[in-house]
């Protein structure tokens, strides 16, 4: 029987999650009480604006997914077939950077390289679909590479040896050895990148360039903050919710995503000199594409008004707000994830694997209900009763914690289940429970994945622009919102310096939290 001390906290967390999702949804569905609402507003096919926003959202997400994943297949294959490549581990770490770089910083980096005064100027055409695609590929190509690379490393070594004995050429190895393994993961990776691009906010808001390049996420924000048209925002949010639910259902139907961890095993595939040259060229090109924007924004920032920006009170107030939101969201997300995963691990150990999986899925509800949809529901629900600007920090922190909960479950889940399966009976036999079990057993074994979860959620919340842009004010601005405000005021040099500060702050906080909480990697835990 499941221990009540594990069940009760998990049930309380599930109730809070249900309230955070269902209460905003109730606000969205209560259309009749909204000013300016008419029943015809739901017939989006009768509105040219809504149709254009809907189809552009799907179109840009589809193009972004294809342009990110298809090259990632070639780059991941090149990494897999070149295990002795110099600085291979360093390059793979570089490909992990876009996962923790705030979206608004990445936008500044893209503008620094491809803007009208950039290294490879696109001119005005950068603001529109072209700029959105460039930024989305910058984010998602490295992610797709890290998701696809384990597929090659999962191929048994003797399969490679057998292909060599049979005299297979490169095309035959691809057809009979690599492709059957790859096609299991490819649909899920495509749908994941599609979902990320569909719910992208900061990239489209800053690089969209006008109404012709507006997505559902940005249209929701514009309807509430600029037009104050809650009825239209609700319709857009419901469209976004329906679309995300369809994608989530398709993802669950097709497959589970592979693990992101990079293994050290290497295929024993004979390669020609030409093949090696092509692989190295692909890796170099992808590395330049990922590294050049980050290098550019640092160089431009150092040549900008660094002292005047650093001496501004608004910057330091924004730094305090950024750290407050990031660390608070991480504490909430990790606490909620810890209670859910303890209960899930005990259910799995007791043989209730289906119920354990449902508990894990409940913590990942944000994959189905986008944060901006939840924020819109909260805005509509609370605005008739309170001034939402007075509640900006509790709202932003809670939504960012909800956004970070799936990452906590993914980072901590496997380690906690393994720990419970190995040591639960031992703990019962020696009456090791409560604080002492955490101090002497769970903490030494789980501190590294716990550190990764805390660091990742903190950095994601620090760099979030979507929720704070909806509820924020100058007094509650974070660094991400400050950058957007500076861009809106055409203070490009100041925005570049602020972007550098946010980038260095995120990287520093990530490294510091991993080191302080995770401890020395050489320690013998």
Image (cartoon, rainbow, N blue to C red):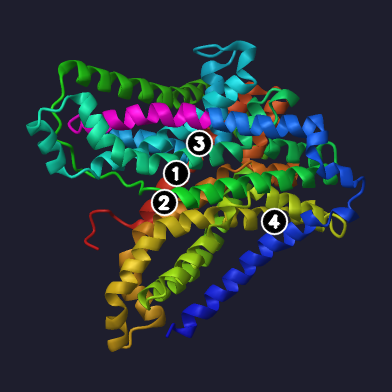
Q: Earlier in the sequence, mark 3 or mark 4?
A: 4
User: Which residue in the protein does label 1 denote?
Assistant: 188
Residue 380 can be seen, yes or no: yes
Q: Nearer the viewer, mark 2 or mark 3?
A: 2
- Foreground residue among 403 and 67: 67
Task: Compare residues 66 and 322 and report the one nearer the observer.
Answer: 66
Label 3 crowd (10 A; few <14 / some 14-19 / many >=20): many
* Dominant SS type (magenta): helix
| Vertical arrangement, residue 395 with respect to residue 49, above or below | below
Going from N to C along the chain, the mark reached first, 2 or 3, is 2
Distance from disc 3 to disc 4, alpha carbons, whole Å, reads: 24 Å
Determine the CA span between mark 4 and mark 1. 32 Å
Q: Residue at x 77, y 34 (%)?
A: 50
Q: Secondary structure at mark 4?
A: helix
Question: Viewer-proximal residue, 371 or 399?
Answer: 371
Nearer mark to the viewer, of 3 and 4: 4
Tell me if residue 107 comes above or below residue 235 in the rendering. above
- How far separated are the C-alphas under marks 2 and 3? 32 Å
Badge 4 vs badge 2, beta-carbon distance below 8 Å: no
Q: Earlier in the sequence, mark 2 or mark 1?
A: 1
Q: Which residue is mark 2?
A: 256
Dots 2 and 1: beta carbons under 8 Å?
yes
Q: Which residues are magenta?
A: 64-86
Q: Residues within 10 Å of mark 4 (few under 14, many from 20)?
A: some
């Amino acid at each position: 029987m499941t221990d009540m001390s594990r069940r009760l906290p998990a049930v309380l967390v599930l109730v809070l999650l249900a309230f955070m999702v269902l209460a905003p949804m109730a606000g969205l569905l209560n259309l009749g009480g909204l000013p300016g609402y008419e029943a015809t507003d739901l017939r989006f096919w009768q509105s040219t604006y809504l149709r254009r926003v809907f189809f552009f959202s799907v179109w840009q997400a589809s193009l972004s997914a294809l342009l990110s994943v298809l090259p990632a297949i070639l780059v991941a294959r090149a990494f897999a077939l070149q295990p002795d490549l110099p600085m291979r581990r360093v390059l793979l770490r570089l490909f992990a950077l876009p996962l923790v770089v705030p979206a608004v910083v990445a936008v500044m980096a893209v503008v620094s390289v491809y803007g009208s005064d950039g290294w490879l100027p696109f001119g005005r055409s950068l603001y529109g679909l072209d700029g959105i695609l460039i930024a989305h590929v910058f984010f998602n190509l490295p992610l797709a590479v890290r998701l696809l690379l384990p597929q090659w490393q999962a191929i048994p070594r003797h399969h490679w040896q057998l292909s060599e004995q049979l005299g297979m050429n490169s095309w035959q190895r691809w057809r009979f050895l690599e492709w059957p393994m790859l096609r299991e993961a490819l649909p899920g990776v495509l749908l994941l990148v599609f979902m990320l691009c569909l719910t992208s906010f900061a990239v489209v808001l800053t690089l969209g360039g006008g109404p012709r390049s507006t997505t559902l996420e940005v249209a929701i924000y514009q309807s509430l903050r600029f037009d104050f048209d809650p009825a239209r925002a609700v319709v857009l949010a419901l469209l976004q919710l329906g679309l995300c639910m369809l994608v989530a259902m398709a993802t669950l139907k097709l497959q589970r995503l592979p693990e992101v961890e990079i293994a050290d095993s290497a295929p024993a595939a004979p390669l020609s000199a030409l093949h090696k040259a092509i692989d190295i060229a692909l890796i170099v090109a992808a590395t330049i594409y990922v590294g050049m924007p980050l290098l550019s924004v640092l160089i431009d920032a150092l040549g900008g008004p660094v002292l005047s920006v650093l001496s501004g009170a608004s910057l330091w107030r924004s730094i305090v707000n950024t750290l407050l939101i990031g660390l608070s969201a991480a504490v909430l997300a990790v606490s909620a994830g810890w209670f859910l995963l303890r209960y899930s691990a005990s259910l799995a150990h007791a043989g209730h694997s289906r119920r354990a999986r449902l508990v894990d899925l409940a913590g990942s509800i944000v994959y189905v209900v986008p944060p901006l949809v939840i924020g819109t529901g909260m805005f509509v629900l609370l605005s008739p009763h309170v001034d939402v600007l007075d509640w900006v920090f509790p709202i932003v922190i809670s939504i960012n914690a909800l956004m970070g909960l799936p990452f906590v479950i993914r980072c901590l889940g496997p380690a906690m289940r393994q720990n419970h399966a190995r040591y639960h009976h031992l703990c019962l036999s020696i009456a090791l429970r409560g604080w002492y079990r955490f101090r002497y057993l769970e903490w030494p074994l789980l501190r590294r994945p716990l550190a990764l979860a805390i660091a990742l959620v903190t950095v994601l919340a620090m760099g979030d622009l979507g929720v704070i842009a909806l509820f924020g004010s100058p007094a509650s601005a974070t660094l991400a919102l400050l950058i957007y405000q500076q861009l809106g005021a055409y203070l490009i040099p100041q925005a570049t310096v602020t972007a550098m500060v946010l980038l260095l702050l995120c990287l520093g906080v990530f490294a510091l939290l991993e080191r302080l909480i995770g401890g020395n990697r050489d320690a013998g835990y």
